Amino acid sequence: MSERDKIATIIKIHRKAANLTQIQLAELAGVGKTVVFELEKGKETVKLNTLRKVLKVLNIDMRFTSPLLDNQNIDNEKS
């Protein structure tokens, strides 16, 4: 299963567990209804910021891992 398919499945499972329609989720996240449709179909055209809005409504955390950052605190780092 591809990463986009995993994201699609996670969003759909959480949305249904919250008893939300796709339209209701879009309204709560402040995004267009097609965004939720596209996310649940695994499309790659959704912007990261928009994805984060949907995930926040569903109480899903997005985490990044990297072997270069295992022992570093990047929350307080500035580029």
Image (tube, rainbow, N blue to C red):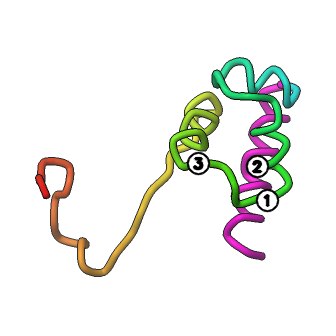
Q: Are marks 3 and 2 in contact (CB under 8 Å)?
A: no
Q: Specify few, some or many for label 2: CA neighbours under 10 Å numbering under 14, 14-19, or 20 or more.
A: many
* Residue 63 percent across, percent down from the top left: 44, 56
Give the label on residue 31, or none. Answer: none
In the picture shown, does residue 50 fall above or below 4? above
Question: Closer to the camera, 57 or 51?
Answer: 51
The stretch of residues the image draws in magenta is 1-20
Residue plotted at (74% across, 28% down): 32
What residue sits right under mark 3 in the picture?
Answer: 47
Report the amino acid beneath label 3: Lys
* Residue 69 percent across, percent down from the top left: 24, 72
- Is residue 11 within the magenta segment? yes
In the picture shown, does residue 25 fall above or below 62? above
- Rendering quarter of residue 24: top right
- Rendering quarter of residue 67: bottom left
What residue sits right under mark 2 in the picture?
Answer: 39
In the picture shown, does residue 39 fall above or below 58? below
Report the amino acid beneath label 1: Gly
Q: CA distance from mark 3 to mark 2?
A: 10 Å
Q: Quadrant of the N terminus?
A: bottom right
Question: Closer to the camera, 53 or 60?
Answer: 53
- Mark 2 lies on a secondary structure that is helix
What residue sits right under mark 1 in the picture?
Answer: 42
Report the amino acid beneath label 2: Leu
* Residue 12 percent across, percent down from the top left: 81, 45
Q: Are marks 2 and 1 in contact (CB under 8 Å)?
A: yes
